[in-house]
Image (cartoon, grey):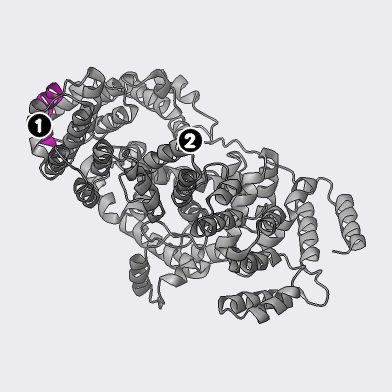
C-alpha cells in the first residue's frame, strides 16, 4: 500500500471512529482492502484469477507458467501460499540456510509445521541423522516424526534416549506408524524388546479390543511366555473363565492387569455373570479395596437400567461407597425416572460437597425441598440461583414466576490491537472470497493461538462485523468470552433463516439456536458420523426430507450450501415438531438422537416427569446437553433481537412426560 494512502485512511479512521465500533471495523476492512488491491497493474479480481491459475499450473507440474504467474502476484495476500507450494516442491534439494530463511519469513503461517515435518522426512530418507537432530533438537509432534527423531539418536550415539523413546512408542494398543519399524528393530537387536514388553503391549491391545494386534504380538513371544500369550487371547475370547484364572494364577502385576481387563470384558458381554464372579475374581488376585471398588463401579455402570431386585441391591451397595461422581449422577437419574424423591435425595447427598455446590445440583436440591416441604420452603434456594447464564438458573426463574435475567457484556473494538494481525486477516479474507473455508479456518485458529485475551475479544468483534460467523464463535470459545452474546451468537445467514422461518412457521430464534448448536455456523462442518452443513443433516435424512418436500436433492456435497441446508434442515425440524405436537423438547431430542429414541425415552418415563425432569432424565449426555443448549440459545437470540424472553411454552410446561 502506498504510504500516503495508508496514512490518509488511518487518520480518517481515527477521527471518525470515536466510540463507534462499526465504523472502526469498516475502516480496518478498508485498510485490508487497499492492501489487497495494491498490486501494480492488476485489479484484485485479476489477482484472484491468476492465483487460481497458478495453483492449477503447479498441480499439473507446469512450472514455467506457475513461475510467470507467481511473479505477478508478489503483493497479493495469498502470495505466501504460492511460495509454500514452490518451496516444498523442491524441498529435498533445499539448503539448510534456505529452509531457515523460509521458516523465519513465514513463521506466522499455519503451514510452517507441515514444512518442518516434510524436512524431517527428507533428512531421514537421506539418513542424515546428525543434520536431523541439529534441525530438530527437541521431541517433535506427531508419531511419525518422533520415530525418526529417536532413530536419529540411536544412530548418533545416544542409545539411552533412543531406547526410552522407542519403548514409549512401542507400548501402544493400536498400530504404530511404519516409520517406527527401524527404531523397533534397534530396540529388538539391543535385547530390550523382550517378552515382558511384548506382553505389556498385548494387554494394551486387549484394552483397545484389538484382537488382530494381539495375535500378531503373540507370535513374537518365545519360551514359556508363548503360553502366557495364548492365555491372554483365550481369556479375551472367553472371559467367563476370569474367576478360575484369577484363583489359579500366581499373584503378579501382569496377572492382576489381565484379570481386570478380562473381568471388564465379561461385564460388557454378560453383566449378571460378572456379578456372580466378582468375589472369586477379586479374591483370587488379592485386589485391595480401592481396586475392588473400581471393578465394582465398572459393573454398576452397566446395571443402571436393570429391573432385577438382586442386581439392583448389589449395584446400590457398591455405589453407596463409591467416589465416582459420574456414577452417582447416573444413579440419581434412575431415581428421577422412577419419580422417587426420597431416593433422589439419598443419591444427591452421596455426592461430594464440591459436586453438590454446582448450580445443577443446587437446583435439584431446591426441587427436592419443594417436593418434601412445599414451595415456600424452597423459595430461598431457587432465588439464590437467579441471574446466571445457565439452564438451571432459568428453570429456577420459571418455578418462581420471576423474569429471566441474562447477564450481558459488550466490547468496543480497538483498531490498534489488530495491527499485528493485518497480513493474516488479509489472507483469511481472500481465502473466504475464494471459498477456501477450511484453509481460512486454519489461518484463524493460528491467529487465535498467538493472540492474548484482549486481542481475542477484538478478533471476535472484527469477525462478527465481517460476517465471518463461525470464526467469531471460535474466537469467543478461545477467549472464554461467555458473556459476549453478540459475538457468541451472531445472526448468521439471516436472509435464508428469515425466509424459511416464515415458510415453515418456525421462530427465527429457534432456527438460529439449533444451527448455532449444530455447527456454530460452519458451512462445511462434517461430523464424525457424516452429518453435514449448518444444520448438520445426515445425507439419508436430507434425501428423505427432500422427497417429502418435493425438492430435488443433488447429493451430500450440496449440503454445504447454506440455502439448501437451511431449506432441508428447517423442513426436517418442522416434521419433527408436527410429529411431537409442537413440543420443542421432544423435537430437539429427536433431531439429535433420532425420533425412535425420543419415543423410547418418553415411554420409559411413562408420564412421571415434568419438562425439566424429562430433560434431566435423558440418558445420553450429548442429547441432554443439546436440548438444554438449544433452549438457552433460543433465549439468547431473543435477547439479541429485542424479543420477549421466553423459556418453555405453556404446553411444554404443563405436559407430563
Q: Which residue is denoted by mark 1 in the rendering?
A: 245
Above-or-below relation of 61 to 317: below
**Could you tell me which residue is drawn at 79 percent across and 54 percent down?**
23
Answer left or right for 473 relative to 385.
Answer: right
Q: Which residue is denoted by mark 2 in the rendering?
A: 394
- Depth order, front residue of 20/170: 170
Q: Which quadrant of the figure contains the N terminus?
A: bottom right
Above-or-below relation of 250 to 178: above
Q: Which mark is residue 263?
A: none
Determine if residue 305 is in view: no
**Could you tell me which residue is drawn at 35 percent across and 58 percent down?**
576
Secondary structure mostly seen in magenta is: helix
Image location of residue 409, percent across then percent down: 65, 38
Q: Secondary structure at mark 1?
A: helix
Local crowd size for mark 2, using a 10 Å CA cut-off: few (<14), some (14–19), many (≥20): many
Range drawn in magenta: 270-284
- Depth order, front residue of 111/483: 111
Local crowd size for mark 1, using a 10 Å CA cut-off: few (<14), some (14–19), many (≥20): many
Answer left or right for 583 relative to 562.
Answer: left
Above-or-below relation of 325 to 438: above
Image location of residue 116, percent across then percent down: 58, 54
**Could you tell me which residue is drawn at 90 percent across and 57 percent down?**
7
Quarter assignment of residue 541: bottom left
Residue 279 highlighted magenta (yes or no): yes
Q: What whole-number distance in Å separates the C-alpha atoms at marks 2 and 1? A: 54 Å
Above-or-below relation of 453 to 512: above
- Depth order, front residue of 128/614: 128
Determine if residue 427 is in view: yes
Image location of residue 311, percent across then percent down: 12, 30
Amino acid at each position: 500500500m502506498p504510504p500516503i494512502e495508508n496514512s490518509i485512511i488511518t487518520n480518517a479512521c481515527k477521527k471518525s471512529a470515536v466510540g463507534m465500533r462499526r465504523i472502526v471495523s469498516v475502516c480496518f476492512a478498508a485498510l485490508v482492502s487497499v492492501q489487497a488491491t495494491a498490486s501494480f497493474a492488476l485489479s484484485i479480481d485479476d489477482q484472484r484469477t491468476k492465483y487460481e491459475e497458478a495453483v492449477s499450473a503447479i498441480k499439473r507440474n507446469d512450472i514455467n507458467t506457475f513461475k510467470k504467474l507467481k511473479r505477478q502476484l508478489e503483493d497479493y495476500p495469498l502470495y505466501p501460499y504460492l511460495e509454500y507450494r514452490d518451496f516444498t516442491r523442491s524441498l529435498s534439494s533445499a539448503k539448510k540456510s534456505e529452509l531457515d530463511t523460509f521458516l523465519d519469513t513465514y513463521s506466522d503461517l499455519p503451514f510452517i509445521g507441515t514444512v518442518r515435518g516434510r524436512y524431517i522426512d527428507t533428512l531421514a530418507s537421506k539418513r542424515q541423522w546428525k543434520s536431523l537432530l541439529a534441525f530438530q533438537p527437541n521431541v517433535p509432534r506427531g508419531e511419525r516424526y518422533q520415530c525418526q527423531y529417536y532413530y536419529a539418536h540411536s544412530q548418533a550415539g545416544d542409545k539411552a534416549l533412543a531406547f526410552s523413546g522407542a519403548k514409549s512408542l512401542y507400548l501402544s494398543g493400536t498400530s504404530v506408524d511404519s516409520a517406527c519399524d527401524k527404531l523397533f528393530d534397534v530396540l529388538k537387536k539391543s535385547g530390550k524388546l523382550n517378552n515382558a514388553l511384548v506382553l505389556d503391549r498385548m494387554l494394551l491391545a486387549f484394552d483397545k479390543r484389538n484382537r488382530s494386534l494381539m495375535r500378531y504380538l503373540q507370535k513374537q513371544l518365545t519360551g514359556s511366555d508363548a503360553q502366557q500369550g495364548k492365555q491372554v487371547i483365550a481369556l479375551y475370547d472367553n472371559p467367563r473363565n476370569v474367576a478360575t484364572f484369577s484363583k489359579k494364577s500366581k499373584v503378579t502385576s501382569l496377572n492382576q492387569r489381565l484379570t481386570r481387563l478380562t473381568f471388564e470384558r465379561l461385564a460388557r458381554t454378560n453383566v449378571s455373570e460378572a456379578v456372580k464372579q466378582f468375589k472369586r475374581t477379586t479374591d483370587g488376585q488379592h485386589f485391595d479395596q480401592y481396586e475392588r471398588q473400581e471393578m465394582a463401579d465398572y459393573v454398576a455402570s452397566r446395571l443402571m437400567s436393570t429391573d432385577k431386585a438382586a442386581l439392583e441391591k448389589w449395584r446400590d451397595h457398591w455405589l453407596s461407597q463409591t467416589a465416582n461422581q459420574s456414577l452417582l449422577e447416573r444413579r440419581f437419574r434412575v431415581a428421577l425416572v422412577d419419580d422417587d424423591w426420597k431416593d433422589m435425595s439419598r443419591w444427591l447427598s452421596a455426592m461430594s460437597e464440591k459436586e453438590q455446590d454446582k448450580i445443577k445440583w443446587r437446583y435439584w436440591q431446591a426441587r427436592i425441598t419443594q417436593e418434601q416441604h412445599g414451595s415456600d420452603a424452597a423459595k430461598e434456594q431457587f432465588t439464590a440461583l437467579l441471574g446466571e447464564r445457565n439452564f438451571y438458573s432459568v428453570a429456577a426463574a420459571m418455578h418462581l414466576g420471576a423474569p429471566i435475567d441474562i447477564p450481558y457484556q459488550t466490547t468496543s473494538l480497538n483498531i490498534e490491537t489488530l495491527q499485528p494481525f493485518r497480513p493474516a486477516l488479509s489472507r483469511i479474507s481472500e481465502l473466504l472470497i475464494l471459498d477456501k473455508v477450511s484453509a481460512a479456518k486454519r489461518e484463524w485458529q493460528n491467529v487465535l493461538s498467538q493472540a492474548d485475551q484482549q486481542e481475542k475479544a477484538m478478533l471476535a468483534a472484527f469477525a462478527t462485523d465481517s460476517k465471518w460467523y463461525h470464526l467469531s464463535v471460535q474466537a469467543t470459545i478461545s477467549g472464554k468470552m461467555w458473556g459476549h452474546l453478540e459475538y457468541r451468537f451472531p445472526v448468521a445467514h439471516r436472509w435464508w433463516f428469515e425466509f424459511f422461518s416464515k415458510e415453515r412457521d418456525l421462530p427465527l430464534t429457534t432456527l438460529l439456536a439449533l444451527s448455532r448448536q449444530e455447527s456454530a455456523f460452519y458451512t462445511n462442518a462434517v461430523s464424525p458420523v457424516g452429518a453435514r452443513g449448518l444444520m448438520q443433516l445426515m445425507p439419508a435424512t436430507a434425501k428423505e426430507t427432500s422427497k417429502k418436500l418435493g425438492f430435488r436433492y443433488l447429493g451430500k456435497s450440496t449440503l454445504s450450501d447454506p440455502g439448501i441446508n437451511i431449506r432441508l434442515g428447517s423442513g426436517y425440524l418442522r416434521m419433527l415438531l408436527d410429529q411431537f405436537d409442537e413440543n420443542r423438547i421432544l423435537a430437539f431430542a429427536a433431531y439429535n438422537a433420532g425420533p425412535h429414541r425420543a419415543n423410547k425415552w418418553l415411554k420409559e418415563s411413562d408420564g412421571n416427569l415434568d419438562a425439566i425432569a424429562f430433560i434431566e432424565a435423558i440418558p445420553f449426555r450429548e442429547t441432554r446437553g443439546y436440548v438444554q443448549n438449544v433452549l438457552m440459545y433460543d433465549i439468547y437470540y431473543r435477547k439479541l433481537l429485542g424479543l420477549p424472553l421466553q423459556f418453555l411454552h405453556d404446553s411444554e410446561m404443563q405436559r407430563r412426560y
